[in-house]
Amino acid sequence: MRLSRYFLPVLKETPSEAQIVSHRYMLRAGMIKQASAGIYSWLPMGFKLLRKLENIVHEEQAKAGHIAMQMPTLQSADLWRESGRYDGYGEEMLRMQDRHGRDMLFSPTAEEMFTDVFRSHVTSYKDLPLTLYQIQWKFRDEIRPRFGVMRGREFYMKDGYTFDLTKEDALHAYNRHLVSYLRTYERMGLQAIPMRADSGPIGGDYTHEFLVLAETGESEVFYDSEITDLSFGDRQIDFDDVAQCQAVLEEFTSRYARTDETHDAAEFAKVPEARQRTARGIEVGQIFYFGTQYSESMGALVQDGDGNKVPVHMGSHGIGVSRLLGAIIEASHDDKGIIWPEGVTPFHCGIVNLKTGDEAADAACEAIYKSLSALGLEPLYDDRNERAGGKFATMDLIGLPWRITVGPRGLKNGVVELTSRRTGESEEMPPEQAIARIAEIYGVIAK
Ligand code: 5CA
């Protein structure tokens, strides 16, 4: 993409309504624009990033054997009356009527819709296990939307629903989700710690929230510092292997890690004092096994091996996709702007032309741009006729991890400059070498 032809409405001033760094940078970098409280228009770069995160989620879900589909955002109230949740959901549910006076709502989550699809089409245990999921806009009329996409009213969520014959199978589905989520967050450059969560009125021990540590997080968290040494890395997982998934779950959940909702001071005191940590965290996902609550109230029954009709065991598993963008920025920025991890960056590499109009500089930038594009990478070429300082400030703000700077003086010596956004370190080298380095970083073969 050539910046002169892109739509990147960068703001010079820091918007006064933004209280936290991710909100400020998302507005300043032209990623989002508030449409009304807690509702945002996703401008091209924000939209591109949302798609990147969504793709990572889809890829990791596919590896775990989960099946994508899509539900409508507007749903009939009748289904929610069946499950008993329509009246109880309260003011967070946005309710409306259609022209025939029928009660409708904008989906805040989708247990009912998925249970309804399931009961309409699945009748036998032979079709289990089954995990269906979607990535779809949700609406919750939050009383205090704030911090930009962190606590929106409209937000983008991956929500998955598991259907199993037995509790044991359903717990494997739970473990599988935990493992798959760990991989998903790591690919986004995040450490998200599974913490014992509050299961609310339904009860049970089987719910974890995933929290990214950040000063601006909304939850207070308590944990054993050993947890932050764990990393999933590139280990190979067979998602059908019950013992393997269970072992990963135990590895990542056996140490003390809880939010203020489930914090138990007496238990925490058992952690050696030097390892006790109190911090703040951003909740980027939750997994939940809830048994047969919905399948019983909505009649989602299957025939078991003995010919009896039994309610299926269910779980629901969510990732806050739009919130994740804010969380990544909170975890990865400096005072000049965002620093995208390579796995999610909107463009792989920036190209800054220090002297647009200079024949040699224009030609060199053009050649680098074409070579990177030919490798299947997406460079962002700042070809505007602007001061170098302004170009650098924009690149730093939007946070591309790598930048190639091209100017007439360097070209006389046959070199361009390759700069890491994270370390700020620059190195001079011939253009071909800079291209090869970028190709290597992103794991493509430079021709
Ligand atoms: N049905 C279950 C799981 S599928 C569910 O709705 N879980 S949830 O309420 O925990 O939401 C899942 C994730 O969505 C949360 O972990 C959080 O990351 C994100 N989320 C929830 N509310 C908001 C909001 N108002 N703004 C942005 N993200 C949100």
Image (spheres, rainbow, N blue to C red):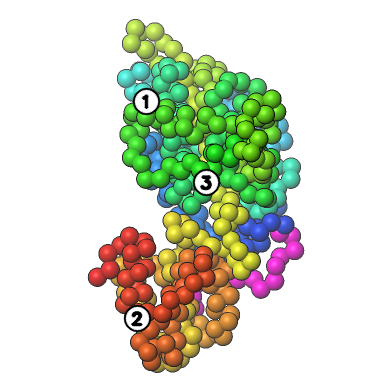
For image coordinates 49% across by 85% down, the residue present is: 354
Count of numbered badges drawn on the protein: 3
Q: In this view, does 385 lie above or below 35?
A: below
SS majority, magenta = loop
| Residue 364 in view, yes or no | yes
Q: Are marks 1 and 3 in contact (CB under 8 Å)?
A: no
- Residues in magenta, as a range: 1-18
> Which sits in the foreground, 399 or 409?
409
For image coordinates 45% across by 23% down, the residue present is: 171
Dot 1: few (<14), some (14–19), or many (≥20) neighbours within 10 Å?
few
Q: Quadrant of the N terminus?
A: bottom left
Provide the residue designation for mark 1: 243
Amino acid at dot 3: Gln
Provide the residue designation for mark 2: 430
The kind of secondary structure element at disc 1 is helix
Q: In this view, does 111 lie to the left or right of 261?
A: left
For image coordinates 66% across by 59% down, the residue present is: 21
Provide the residue designation for mark 3: 191
The residue carrying mark 2 has its beta carbon less than 8 Å from ligand 1: no
Which callout, 1 or 3, points at the residue further toward the start of the chain?
3
> Which sits in the foreground, 437 or 177?
437
Which callout, 3 or 2, points at the residue further toward the start of the chain?
3
Amino acid at dot 2: Pro
Q: Is residue 411 above or below residue 88?
A: below
> Which sits in the foreground, 184 or 165?
184
Q: Distance between the residues labelled 1 and 3?
A: 24 Å
| Residue 98 in view, yes or no | no
> Which sits in the foreground, 212 or 23?
212
Amino acid at dot 1: Ala
Dot 2: few (<14), some (14–19), or many (≥20) neighbours within 10 Å?
some
Q: In which quarter of the image is residue 330?
A: bottom right
